[in-house]
Image (cartoon, grey):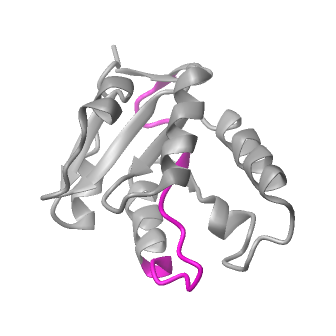
Amino acid sequence: MLVMTNKGYKKEGETMRAFLAIKHHDDVRNRDFIEEITAQFKKINIDIFVFVRDVEHYEPWVGTPRELMQSAFAEIEKSDIVIAEISEQSIGVGIEVCYAFTRGIPVYVLAKKGTRVNSTIKGICKDVLVYENLEDLQKFKFKGAT
């Protein structure tokens, strides 16, 4: 099976780079959650890039807000896909998802069971994975694949 990415198609099982759009907390209370998401996707050959971890190293951003967004956009463009975790509302996640969509980068959504997934996000993403526990992420399949 082939999987559609930002850079064309990849064979299922080939490693893909995914930008994880996820709510950022100044106190990094979701650090373990981010690391567990990363570990679960690694098991299915998806390398997760997380801006707060891989650029900011869980420290406060030292540049301007414009520089922050420009850096995030550059990382999105380097990615095969964007995965957005939307269980917590976040303006930043919405901006990253819209940016990816306008650049033709496939967007997939993660939502914890019970999260309301609005029609706007459904309208621009390839698929929504509703999960009960993070092990469910290993069942991630790509719609829009051939």
Residue 31 colored magenta? yes
- Please identify the quadrant where the C terminus is shown: top left
Above or below residue 54? Residue 29 is below
Q: Could you say where residue 120 lies in the image, as x and y percent from the top left?
A: 32, 31
Verify whether residue 102 appears in magenta. Answer: no
Which residue shows up at 28% across the image and 44% down it?
A: 140
Q: Is residue 17 visible?
A: no
Q: How many marks?
A: 0
Residue at 48 percent across and 44 percent down: it is: 94
Spot the residue most to the top. Answer: 146
Q: Position of residue 29 (x, y in %)?
A: 47, 84
| Residue 75 in the image, given as x and y percentages of width and height | 71, 44
Q: In which image quadrant can residue 55 be found?
A: bottom right
Given residues 138 and 28, the one toward you in this image is 28
Q: Quadrant of the N terminus?
A: top left
Above or below, comparing residue 81 to residue 55 in the picture: above
Answer left or right for 146 relative to 70: left
Residue 58 lies left or right of residue 48; in this view the side is: right
Tell me where the magenta segment starts and ends, as one range. Answer: 10-32
Q: Position of residue 124 (x, y in %)?
A: 38, 25
Q: Is residue 107 left or right of residue 53?
A: left
Residue at 78%, 57% (x, y): give it.
Answer: 65
Residue 64 lies in what quarter of the image?
bottom right
In the image, residue 100 sits, relative to residue 133, either above or below, namely: above
Residue at point 79%, 44% (across, down): 70
Residue 44 seen in the figure: yes
Height in image: 29 above or below 82?
below
